[in-house]
Amino acid sequence: MTEAVVSEHREYLRIARAVGHEAAELLCEAQQEIGVIRTKSNERDLVTEWDTHTEELILARLAEFTPGIAVLAEETGKHGDTEAELCWVIDPIDGTVNFAHGIPLFCVCISLEVAGQPVAAVVEAPAMGWTFSASLGGGAHIRVSERELAMQVSQTTELAKSMLASGFPYDRAATSHNFAQWEHFQRKAGACRRFGAASLDLCMVARGWLDGYWETRLSPWDLSAGALIVREAGGCVTGITGDTFSSRSGHAIASNGGIHKEILAELAIVGTPKL
């Protein structure tokens, strides 16, 4: 990768960080009054008026800073040719259920994909004071308490000593779910947690707080930004069966690399969740 390409990725990251910061500030104000809460696909799948307001803000700023680049957005779908070489992938609030209940584990996610792979990404968790970011070839960083720190995944090499995370689909009561895999890893891993925001799970792997993460039945905006941040922190990200990662696939395993093969092996024993 040439220095010019790395520099281009950093410029896109600069834009993503500026837009993400503005969106995060809006959500800080929103915490004082959540407002109207609606449902989408089912009663567990919530959306607030702030999901809409925040997405509108992000779309407007990206159109201003990078006119002509398509956007794939959670609430409003496709804007332009989202199969083009360049495409922004955005989630105005990942962890909307947490947000709607006043739990501070929610975030804004913005990533730029080139040919389907993320090259610049920011995940803003305003209630926690965390900003995670990465650019391809530029490393991964966290900004907290006005300090910018480089991130590195953990060094754990045994699944039995590892902290893992996963999540559950909104329609788990009626269709397929990953309960069997969850129970299996509760027995095999050191511990398992469910925080309710896939992007933050991925960033926690990058930070070294978690050693691994797996989940299926997600959307591109749940995976794109966090996957790049994990990779740039030295971690490994693949599909749920070890195949090449794609945010559009809706599934992923992310780890520090040291336990990746063990996660794949255990999933092969218990069976992978329905994709």
Image: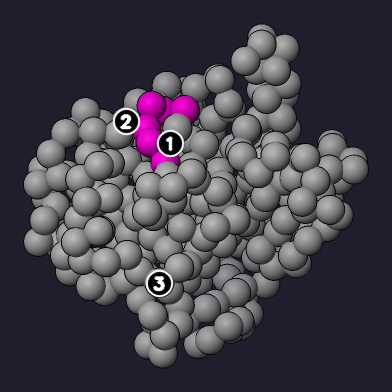
Q: Residue 186's x, y, as percent?
A: 14, 62
Which mark is first along the chain, 1 or 2? 2
**Quarter of the rendering containing residue 37:** bottom right
Determine the secondary structure under disc 2.
Answer: loop
**Camera-side residue of 81 and 8:** 81
Q: Residue 208's x, y, as percent?
A: 29, 35
Callout 1 crowding tier (Cα within 10 Å): few <14, some 14–19, many ≥20: many
Q: Which residue is mark 3?
A: 274
Q: Residue 53's x, y, as percent?
A: 73, 63
In space, the residues marked 3 and 2 are separated at their CA atoms by 28 Å
Query: Which residues lie in the magenta part?
Result: 232-237
Q: Which residue is mark 1?
A: 230
Give the residue type that dot 2 points to: Val
**Circle 2/circle 1 CB separation < 8 Å:** yes
> What residue appears at the point 73 percent right and 21 percent down from the top-left corner?
8
In space, the residues marked 2 and 1 are separated at their CA atoms by 8 Å
